[in-house]
Image (cartoon, rainbow, N blue to C red):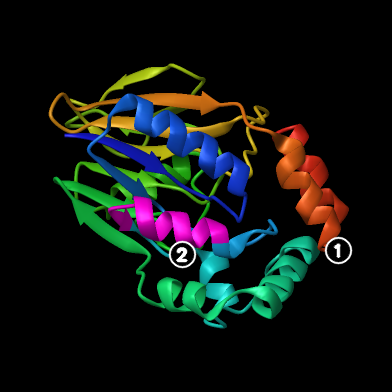
């Protein structure tokens, strides 16, 4: 089965529309979202509506939970906390209802899905081989898909490997992984707020039959996302960072 994997939309409607357009062109059979549909951006309802309509599976992320009041935001950055407060004040009840139905973990086609990590599905950022090692020790499937860090990357350990044998790398547009052997953690990157130096929206094309994963980047009209952020009175940094992918 050919699957589009997306994550960390963060209320960025033009980025989500661009990715879903590319997904449609790729003729995938399902779309899986790894969470954080809302937060940071200024169009939460439109993004939640699209996620509900187009995603066959959707997880809940830490920003989604924060908007629902189910997560302490004391650990959030000042800008992130302001965005949570703004979203709580402006989001529609239908969006809250959709988010309440979601879980931070899932399984499909012999793969494990987590918003953040197998060790901590809501909050842990997996950005080092040491963190990946710990997660691989507890993940329930050989291949796990993760989001949350906003970086397109992978970590892998050989089939009979152990802690210390793990390697990983950041991935660029068009890069292909052969997932046929070993243990894997794969992050598609962020649709709505990339943090890997590439401002283009990210998504992953996963072939569950061939056991391959190809990374994609899609340009979108950043002005159309930055403008509503400024108009809403959200922190200016949340708009500026979209242009640099940081």
Q: Nearer the viewer, residue 221 or 31?
A: 221
Q: Residue at x 33, y 37 (%)?
A: 4
Residue 190: % across, % down: 54, 42
Look at the image and tell me in which quarter the C terminus lies: top right
Q: Is residue 166 toward the left or the right of residue 73 in the image?
A: left
First in sequence, mark 2 or 1: give its number.
2
> Toward which corner of the image does residue 166 lie, by quadrant?
top left
Segment tinted magenta in the rendering: 46-57
Work out whether residue 56 can be spotted. yes
Identify the element where label 1 is drawn. loop
Q: Is residue 213 toward the left or the right of residue 124 in the image?
A: left
Examine the structure image and report whether residue 244 is included in the region drawn in magenta: no
Work out whether residue 166 can be spotted. no
Residue 33: % across, % down: 39, 51
Q: Callout 2: 10 Å neighbours few (<14), some, many (20+)?
A: many
> Toward which corner of the image does residue 60 lie, by quadrant?
bottom left
Identify the element where label 2 is drawn. loop
Counting labels gives: 2
Q: Callout 1: 10 Å neighbours few (<14), some, many (20+)?
A: few
Dot label at residue 122: 2
Dot label at residue 233: 1
Q: Is residue 240 above or below residue 71?
A: above
Q: Residue at x 51, y 38 (%)?
A: 189
Most frequent secondary structure within the magenta stretch: helix
Residue 149: % across, % down: 55, 46
Q: Is residue 41 toward the left or the right of residue 148 in the image?
A: right
């Amino acid at each position: 089965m050919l699957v589009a994997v997306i994550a960390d939309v963060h209320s960025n409607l033009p980025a989500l529309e661009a990715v879903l357009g590319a997904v449609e062109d790729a003729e995938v059979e399902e779309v899986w979202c790894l969470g954080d549909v809302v937060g940071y951006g200024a169009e939460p309802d439109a993004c939640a509506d699209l996620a509900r309509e187009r995603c066959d599976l959707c997880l809940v992320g830490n920003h989604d939970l924060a908007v629902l009041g189910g997560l302490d935001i004391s650990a959030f950055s000042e800008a992130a906390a302001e965005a949570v407060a703004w979203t709580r004040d402006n989001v529609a009840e239908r969006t809250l209802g959709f988010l309440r139905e979601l879980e931070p973990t899932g399984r499909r086609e012999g793969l494990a899905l987590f918003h953040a990590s197998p060790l901590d599905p809501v909050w842990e950022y997996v950005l080092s081989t040491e963190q990946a090692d710990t997660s691989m020790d507890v993940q329930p499937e050989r291949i796990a898909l993760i989001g949350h860090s906003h970086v397109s990357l992978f970590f892998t350990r050989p089939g009979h490997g152990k802690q210390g044998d793990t390697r990983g790398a950041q991935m660029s547009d068009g890069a292909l992984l052969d997932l046929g052997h070993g243990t894997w953690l794969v992050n598609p990157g962020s649709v709505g707020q990339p943090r890997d130096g590439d401002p283009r929206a990210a998504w992953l094309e996963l072939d569950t039959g061939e056991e391959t994963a190809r990374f994609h980047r899609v340009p979108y009209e950043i002005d159309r996302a930055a403008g509503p952020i400024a108009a809403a009175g959200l922190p200016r940094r949340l708009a500026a960072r979209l242009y640099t992918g940081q």
